[in-house]
Amino acid sequence: MTLPGPGVLAVHPSALAANPCLACGACCAFFRVSFHWMETDAGGGTVPTGLAEPVDLHRVAMRGTTCSPVRCNALEGEVGTSVRCTIHPLRPSVCRAFQPAWENGEPNPDCDRARAQFGLPPLAPGWHQPDDDSPPEAPAPDRRAA
Ligand code: SF4
Ligand code: SF4
């Protein structure tokens, strides 16, 4: 068994089956992540203002995503191995809207493109339906009146 090195987050395999993004993070290190400034906490939103930088009059971007190489300052871990978004509940709408390919049965060429940049293969349809080798659940209790 290989233990993760320093700065690499350990992710349980079952979590990866549920969310391949935990072993990816490519889009957070590939695209400029820009959004309206009112999504920052200074504008009444959620995104920590200190993690955003101005783009123009109305838009800001996550720090680290306007330069090269791109890497959002909120991303922790190693791309392609084990990552997490340190502001996940507070992340901007653009991040919430960006879904891994096939999560809802739809392709996402931008997900494929970001992954390819890091030598990762595109996600395959059906990734979110892993083989279920877990024990069967107990039958639900009968709630009918006696
Ligand atoms: S590139 Fe796709 S799989 Fe990777 S973190 Fe982004 S959405 Fe998830
Ligand atoms: S805010 Fe989180 S989800 Fe959005 S680009 Fe940064 S690390 Fe990725």
Image (cartoon, helix red, strand yellow):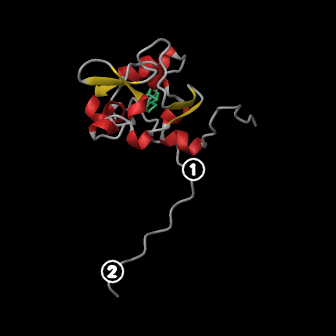
- Say which residue label 1 marks: 133
Q: Secondary structure at mark 1?
A: loop
- Relative depth, front residue between 126 and 83: 83
| Residue 54 image offset from top left, x and y in percent | 33, 21
Three-letter code, disc 2: Arg
Q: Report crowding for label 2: few under 14, some 14 to 19, many 20 or more residues within 10 A (C-alpha).
A: few
Where does ligand 1 appear, by image quarter?
A: top left
Q: Residue sitting at 36 percent across and 32 percent down?
A: 95
**Farthest residue in the left direction?**
58
- Say which residue label 2 marks: 144
Q: Report if the CB atoms under discs 2 and 1 are less than 8 Å apart.
A: no
**Farthest residue in the right direction?**
1
Q: Report crowding for label 1: few under 14, some 14 to 19, many 20 or more residues within 10 A (C-alpha).
A: few
Of label 2 and label 1, which has the lower sequence position? 1
Q: Residue sitting at 50 percent across and 62 percent down?
A: 137
Q: Is 96 located above or below residue 109 in the figure?
A: below
Within the image, what quadrant is residue 48 found in? top left
Quadrant position of the N terminus in the picture: top right
Q: Residue sitting at 48 percent across and 42 percent down?
A: 18
| Residue 44 image offset from top left, x and y in percent | 28, 41
